Image (cartoon, coloured by chain):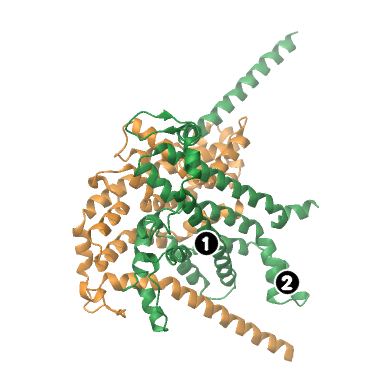
């Protein structure tokens, strides 16, 4: 009887202690918890509602159902924005991947001076935003810019770059390649984590550097390639500053990036409902791409733990 | 014997090829920087020469002074520093607290909530921009620094929480246990044992976050209306609108905006690289 009573009291105390520990945990993560609700979850849900209204900020919203989405379907600029952004993602993401990976493989040679090169390649990432956009705006200047001066030296008459409907988008892709060092650093860290025994095994088999690359380096790096691919896709869908500063979407909407179009609708035409519909479509598109890459990962991403388990 | 020497020679040739490609790459990467400095030091006339001269003649150091005088540079610098400083303090504190909570404390739903943190890292920010703007507008915060600062105090970017959590996961648990036996409460353990240990990670978060706020463009563009409240990013854009063809002054201003980030990078290269690497390799 008494022992039962003591058990009961102890149980209560233990439960209270556990409750206290839980509350303490929630207390520590509460800044994020509140922030997540206020700045992410609630806005995300309310933007569904906003996307079903006509709301110009100065008057109260009127409910219009799915009008914004049907309007979007027949809006040529929406399709143009989608096309521009799609082309950019298809060009920039693979180029950045291949170039970033290649430089990382070269830097992973144990040779003197590699630290210096790493710093140089990474340096453009330190500065970003308006400053970088302005610099490249000047580089691409068709009359006095340095790029066309260099091209003229080898006998090529350079295009009008940002003023040309054909060359404006490639110019922005080139700009994006300048900061390829960001993904390079991540690849490099991954390469340095590959156990050297794996390479020694290839050496014993008499394999060349090429077989090292295809049989060891690339398979071991697939998780990191996967990570960079996902983040690259998500970021490339959201290009804004380069487009805003360098072309403002022109010439003739040739560089009307999706987020730029969204920004214009929201903060220049004050079409908050329509902008929210655009935002949701973008969100679903990025989500679909991300899921696609995730699904494909079982085919090509190699995790060491799988082998250990198997 | 012959086999060995031929292999050595092959290796040597390989190394030469590696250096050649890297030198070419480094040259291409640095060319825009050289061009920027070359333009910034030219006088107005020689900017419009074709083909351009690489070495400015005469060298106009006073372009920097002119660029500073052309816009309220010091005002913009002060605004940028105010936003950046307060935002970074909030980001470092909240990321440390939340990261500690996820790494060291046990509570129901912890793993699911942490998964939520990770998934917000992949959420495109633009999706919530409009409703968040509406919210700040209804609070009367438009044209103030608050929308650019306050979110940092509530976890800010999920990425930094992730960096701190990874760091706390890697510090030995025995330290906490020893302190707990000595009668330390959780907050005391956090503040007196883990925070001092976490200095490198805190520095990483601070530096990366500083860069984000320093060069942020869309945030200030949406929230700040008065020129007097502009940040350097907006100021640079304003400058471009006013001095469209004065490329020498524009490049001088661009250099001035870039310099603090570059200096910070060279001072803390290690923290920089570590912070970026945490995400890719351990994530």
Closest to the observer: B161 or B220? B220
Q: Is residue B12 at all visible to an observer of this figure?
A: yes
* Residue occupying image coordinates x 45% and y 69%: A120
Residue A92: numbered disc: 1
Closest to the observer: B177 or A149? A149
From the viewer's perspective, tell me whether residue A302 is left or right of residue B72: right
Chain for mark 1?
A
Instruction: Give me the chain that's green.
Output: A
* Residue occupying image coordinates x 24% and y 47%: B227
> Is residue B86 positioned above or below B249 on the image?
above
Chain for mark 2?
A
* Residue occupying image coordinates x 50% and y 39%: A69
Give the secondary structure at mark 1.
helix
Residue A200: numbered disc: 2
Residue B72: numbered disc: none
- The colour of chain B is orange
Image quadrant containing the N terminus of chain A:
top right
Label 1 to label 2: alpha-carbon separation: 35 Å
From the viewer's perspective, tell me whether residue A212 is left or right of residue B144: right
From the viewer's perspective, tell me whether residue B66 is left or right of residue B119: left
């Amino acid at each position: 009887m008494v022992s039962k009573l003591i058990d009961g009291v102890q149980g209560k105390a233990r439960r209270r202690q556990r409750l206290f520990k839980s509350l303490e945990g929630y207390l520590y993560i509460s800044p994020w918890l509140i922030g997540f609700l206020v700045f992410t979850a609630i806005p995300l849900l309310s933007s569904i509602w906003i996307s079903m209204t006509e709301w110009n900020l100065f008057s109260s919203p009127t409910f219009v159902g799915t009008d914004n989405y049907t309007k979007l379907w027949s809006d040529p600029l929406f399709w143009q924005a989608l096309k521009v952004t799609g082309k950019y993602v298809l060009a920039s993401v693979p180029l950045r991947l291949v170039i970033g990976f290649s430089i990382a493989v070269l830097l992973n040679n144990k040779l003197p001076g590699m630290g210096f090169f790493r710093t140089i390649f990474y340096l453009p990432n330190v500065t970003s935003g308006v400053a970088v956009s302005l610099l490249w705006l000047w580089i691409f200047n068709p009359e006095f810019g340095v790029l066309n001066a260099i091209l003229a030296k080898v006998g090529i008459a350079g295009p009008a770059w940002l003023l040309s409907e054909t060359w404006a988008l490639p110019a922005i892709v080139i700009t994006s390649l300048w900061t390829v060092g960001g993904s390079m650093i991540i690849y490099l860290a991954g390469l340095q984590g590959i156990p050297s025994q794996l390479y020694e095994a290839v050496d014993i088999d008499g394999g060349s550097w090429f077989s090292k690359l295809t049989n060891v380096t690339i398979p071991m790096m697939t998780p990191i390639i996967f990570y960079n691919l996902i983040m690259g896709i998500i970021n490339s869908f959201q290009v804004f500053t380069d487009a805003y500063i360098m072309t403002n979407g022109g010439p003739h909407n040739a560089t009307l990036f999706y987020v730029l179009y969204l920004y214009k609708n929201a903060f220049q035409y004050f079409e908050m409902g329509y902008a929210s519909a655009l935002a949701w479509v973008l969100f679903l598109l990025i989500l679909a791409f991300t899921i696609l890459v995730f699904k494909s990962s079982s085919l090509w991403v190699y995790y060491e733990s799988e082998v250990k388990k198997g | 014997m012959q086999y060995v020497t031929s292999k050595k020679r092959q290796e040597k040739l390989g190394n030469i090829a590696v250096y050649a490609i890297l030198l070419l790459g480094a040259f291409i990467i640095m060319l825009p920087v050289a061009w920027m400095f070359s333009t910034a030091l030219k006088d107005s006339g020689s900017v419009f020469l074709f083909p351009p001269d690489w070495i400015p003649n005469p060298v106009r150091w006073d372009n920097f002074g002119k660029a500073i005088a052309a816009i309220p540079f010091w005002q913009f610098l002060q605004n940028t520093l105010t936003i950046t400083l307060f935002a970074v303090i909030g980001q470092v504190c909240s990321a440390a607290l939340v990261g500690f909570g996820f790494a060291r404390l046990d509570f129901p739903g912890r793993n699911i909530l942490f998964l939520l943190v990770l998934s917000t890292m992949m959420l495109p920010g633009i999706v919530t921009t409009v409703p968040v703007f509406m919210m700040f507008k209804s609070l009367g915060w438009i044209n103030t620094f608050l929308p650019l600062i306050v979110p940092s105090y509530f976890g800010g970017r999920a990425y930094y929480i992730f960096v701190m959590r990874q760091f706390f996961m890697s510090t030995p648990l025995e330290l906490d246990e020893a302190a707990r036996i000595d009668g330390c409460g959780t907050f005391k353990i956090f503040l007196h044992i883990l925070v001092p240990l976490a200095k490198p990670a805190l520095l990483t978060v601070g530096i990366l976050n500083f860069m984000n706020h320093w060069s942020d463009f869309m945030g200030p563009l949406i929230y700040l209306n008065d020129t007097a409240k502009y940040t350097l990013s907006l100021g640079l854009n304003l400058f471009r609108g006013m001095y469209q063809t004065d490329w020498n002054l524009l490049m001088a201003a661009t250099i001035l905006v870039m310099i603090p980030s570059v200096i910070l990078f060279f001072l803390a290269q290690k923290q920089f690289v570590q912070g970026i690497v945490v995400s890719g390799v351990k994530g």
